[in-house]
Image (cartoon, rainbow, N blue to C red):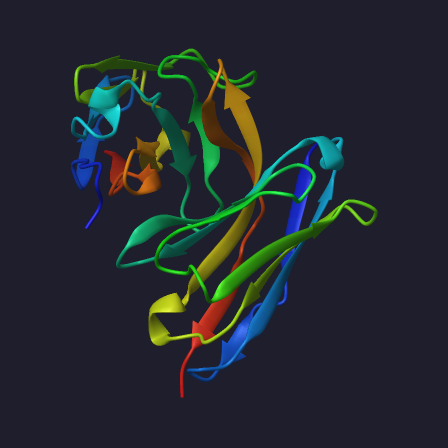
Amino acid sequence: QSVLTQPPSVSGAPGQRVTISCTGSASNIGAGFDVQWYQQPRGAAPKLLIYGNTNRPSGVPDRFSASKSGTSASLAITGLQAEDEADYYCQGYDTSLGYVFGSGTKVTVL
Amino acid sequence: QVYLVESGGGVVQPGGSLRLSCAASGFSFSTYGMHWVRQTPGKGLEWVSLISYDGTNQYYADSVKGRFTVSRDNTRNRVFLQMNSLTTDDTAVYYCSKMAIYGQSSIYFHYWGQGAQVIVSS
């Protein structure tokens, strides 16, 4: 059972906007620790998508954006494309557990 | 281009041992900490261990503390994970990952290898 809770799945048509929530608590996101997001296509390794709550590494399209507020964070994908179909994970730090990951969200492009 | 290649995975009986290796290239290996992370279908992604850039500091998840040992050889650009007293709960794909720091203290997982499958079964 993950410390950071994500919806199991979200879906959208090409071109649409989808959002993925990541809900934590006072011992992780709410404690001020940064949130990262990773994209994992089926059968591949995770890839860094967002670091430091809102920052995109070079090469990540600006269709991906993220925010953090209180004990939650969220990832938004605008202009959804077929290549965005993958699992997405949030990641943070917990004062008791150390580095923690979200439960993961499967994004399906309809 | 950063490359991380894990090796050493396989099938082992409960109570057995296995040593994973991760070969790194494309960056100044001796100046970066390195993580191990594992993934199972049931439990998702789980951080396992972190070793500092010079090997002097090691950190472990409670689930592996006392059984797993992380080490590195900066002359060969490799990081290792020695896994002892394995149980079926250790069955997973194991990834090595290059550590990165944002701001003053935010540590995250910048680049990932392709993973090594470890199966613990009798």
Query: Can you give x and y, in whole percent of width and height, for residue A16 in the image?
Result: 24, 18
Query: Can you give x and y, in whole percent of width and height, for residue A31 in the image?
Result: 24, 21
Outermost right residue? B75
One can see residue B26 in this view: no
Outermost front residue? B56
Q: Nearer the viewer, residue B12 or B101?
A: B101
Query: Can you give x and y, in whole percent of width and height, for residue A6 in the image?
Result: 19, 35
Q: Is residue A62 left or right of residue B29?
A: left
**Does B74 appear above or below A68?**
below
Q: Quadrant of residue A102?
A: top left
**Does B47 appear above or below B93?**
above
Outermost bottom residue? B122
Q: Is residue B66 left or right of residue A58?
A: left
Residue lying at 31% horizontally and 58% vertically, measured from the top left: B41
Residue lying at 28% horizontally and 55% vertically, measured from the top left: B43
Q: Quadrant of residue A92?
A: top left
Q: Is residue B111 left or right of residue A95?
A: right
Q: Is residue B63 left or right of residue B103?
A: left
Q: Quadrant of residue A68?
A: top left
Q: Nearer the viewer, residue A94 or A89?
A: A94
Query: Can you give x and y, in whole percent of width and height, for residue B105 in the image?
Result: 47, 21
Q: Nearer the viewer, residue B96 or A105?
A: B96
The quadrant of the image that shows the C terminus of chain A is top left
Q: How many marks?
A: 0
Residue lying at 43% horizontally and 77% vertically, measured from the top left: B120
One can see residue A50 in this view: yes
